Amino acid sequence: MIFEEIRSGGCCSYLVACGETCTGVLIDPELSQIDRTLGLMARDGVRLQYVIDTHTHADHFSASRDVAEQLRVPVIMHKSSAAPYVDMRVDDGETLIAGKLRLRVLHTPGHTEDSISLVLPDRVFTGDALLRLGTGRTDLPTGDPTVLYDSLFGKLLRLPDELAIYPGHNYKNLPVTTIGQERAENPRLQKTDRAAFVEEMRKLNLSMPDHLTEALRTNRTGGKTVAELLDEAARQIAFMSMEEVCGAIGSGATNLVILDVRERDAYEAGHIPGARHAPRGQLELRVDQLLPDPTARILTYCEFGKISTLAAATLRSLGFNRAVALDGGMKAWREADYPVEVGASPT
Ligand SMILES: [Fe+2]
């Protein structure tokens, strides 16, 4: 069997493939690791049969849709998943076949309603239902400690003792455990009474994960993350350093149009000398009046360098093929003590 664990902080993804046919599945891929994941697949000679999300993640950005699009493979989730990009919805007791691998699907809700675990003869991928010496939380959308109790005690702990646990998270870098070890040592599983387990889960009072709403938005809809949007824009343009821009101003260069895309009060409080002003929100509507020459060399900037990246990409898509963005923003410009001009825009 071909097996790769791909970590992104505390999040774990797995590439599992049949050693004979090199056909495999990818479980819970994460967006920031997509290039590495594709690289490992190529190195190992794996052809994917399915991409599987064990549940709707609230704390990592799923790369399933991107991998599926790039490799033309179906995305698999539980039948109750809300994500519209799922190609095949599975249910408890069904089997997924990849080469000679047979992964049995267990519906193990509780962390989320749509959580599944995937069972192989020697290991089980538990998503966030059962973690090594821990369990998934039950206080996020569709979570329910009573339901998790049934998944843990009624399903996962009934699997053979020797099965190794491969969870969706491993925050403490714990070595591989087994079902038998979890039953004996997992502190959350020592109270086998349902009410006591539920009470313990309800008392946990955990802080909300970073980017919760963004992760749920993108994972439930297939929409883009803000970072993806910025990356796409950044790939469409080049950047100019603050030093370069300062030098151009100092030499009196007239072939560079500097465009401040912040709001008016920010512009008037202090802008790059000679900069013109067009807030990002009005750029498309004012562009022909403001920039009649599409061959002009235009430099956009904003406060932090993100909105200006989007603005320069927008200008390129409108035909301003020499639009670039400042590498940095007005904040960094001020902090570097480059010259600042105050007052209203002449235009
Ligand atoms: Fe999760």
Image (cartoon, rainbow, N blue to C red):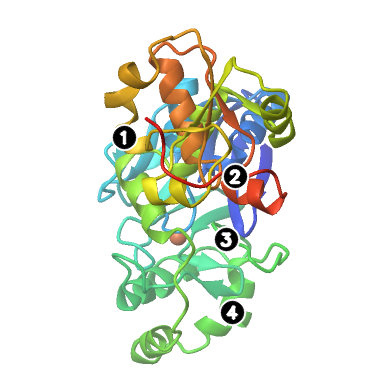
- Residue beneath the point at 26% across and 38% down: 84
Three-letter code for the amino acid on which mark 1 is drawn: Tyr
Location of the C terminus by quadrant is top left
Q: Which mark is residue 14?
A: 2
Residue 27, position in %: x, y? 52, 43
Three-letter code for the amino acid on which mark 4 is drawn: Asn
- Residue beneath the point at 48% across and 52% down: 269
Label 4 environment density (alpha carbons within 10 Å; few <14, some 14–19, many ≥20): some
Mark 1 to mark 2 CA distance (whole Å)? 20 Å
Mark 4 to mark 3 CA distance (whole Å)? 15 Å
Mark 3 to mark 2 CA distance (whole Å)? 11 Å
Q: How many marks?
A: 4
Q: For ligand 1, tell me if the residue under mark 1 lies within 8 Å.
A: no
Mark 1 to mark 4 CA distance (whole Å)? 35 Å
Residue at image mark 4 = 186
Residue 63 visible in image? no
Closer to the camera, 216 or 159?
216
Mark 2 to mark 4 CA distance (whole Å)? 23 Å
Residue 29, position in %: x, y? 53, 42
The quadrant holding residue 76 is: top left
Residue at image mark 3 = 169
Label 3 environment density (alpha carbons within 10 Å; few <14, some 14–19, many ≥20): many
Mark 3 to mark 1 CA distance (whole Å)? 24 Å
Secondary structure under tag 4 reads: loop
The quadrant holding residue 241 is: top right
Secondary structure under tag 1 reads: loop
